[in-house]
Amino acid sequence: MAEEFGFLKSASQYYNKYEDLEEYCLIANKNESDFTDLKNQIVSNKTLAKKINKLGFAKYLVLGDNDKRNNVANQDSVKADLFEAIIGAIAIDSGWDIKRLKNIIIKMLDIEHFFKDVDCREKRPDKFKLENAINTLKELAERGECSMPIYQISEKPIIDNNGKQWWHCRCNVNFRNLQWMGLWTKYTEGYGTSKKLAKKMAAYIVLCDHYGLPNEYKN
């Protein structure tokens, strides 16, 4: 099912960083052999048996008297068969609804667990500079780590209590959740004494939030 529905894609196969932005994809510095090993680990009898135990489904096994005497209920292969049977039943009942199957399989397998130690992005920089924030965010989008940012700048400035003019900019960008949960959208707002500065600030805040870095201009 992973191959059929594209759960794992490699750049040398058929991954497209623009067309696949809405897919459940993972970008990482791994070769195909690494991902093949990872995929084999995910669907191994040992893994599926652990998931059955965690979900508490082992009690639903229907066994014959001979199997009960031989204690086959504790065998990994039997529990793995139960896992596959559950997925098969859902597939039939849903009319092979791909979206529903994806959601069920991702939840039952706890996909995030397998990717928590995978380095999915470049080394985190010490900090971003406000001056180059717009270009830096654009470069992330060009590398496929996020969508191209959309900026919305206010037509008129805001006047504060001291009579100073401030421009407002909202930045919308879709980032990949790097632990296998698809996309999530960041909405950030920046303020500046000019339209250009407000745009830079909005991009800067997105980058700080994405990399978990402090906003030096927060106050």
Image: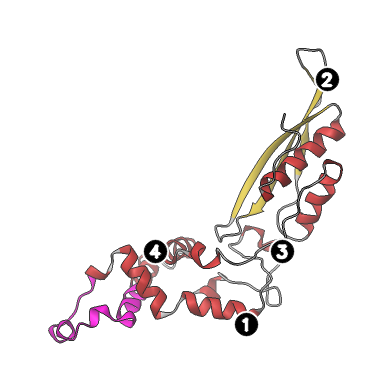
Distance (Cα) linking label 1 and label 3: 21 Å
Q: Tell me which label, 2 or 3, sits earlier in the chain.
A: 3
Task: Give the amino acid at mark 3.
Answer: Lys
Residue at (37% x, 68% y) in the render: 51
- Front position in the image: 8 or 20: 8
Q: Quadrant of the C terminus?
A: top right
Q: Tell me which label, 2 or 1, sits earlier in the chain.
A: 1
Q: Residue furthest front?
A: 126
Q: Residues within 10 Å of mark 2 (few under 14, many from 20)?
A: some
**Label ID, residue 94:** 4
Distance (Cα) linking label 4 and label 1: 33 Å
Task: Give the amino acid at mark 2.
Answer: Gln
Q: Secondary structure at mark 4?
A: loop
Left or right: 84, with 7 as reference point: left
In the picture of the structure, the residue carrying the numbered disc 3 is 17
* Picture quadrant of residue 182: bottom right
In the picture of the structure, the residue carrying the numbered disc 2 is 165
In the picture of the structure, the residue carrying the numbered disc 1 is 33
Task: Give the amino acid at mark 4.
Answer: Ser
Residue 116, image x, y percentages: 55, 63
Q: Secondary structure at mark 2?
A: strand
Q: Secondary structure at mark 3?
A: loop
Residue at (12% x, 83% y) in the render: 65
Q: Nearer the viewer, mark 4 or mark 1?
A: 1
Can you say whether 216 is above or below 80 in the image? above
Q: Can residue 14 be found in the magenta stretch? A: no
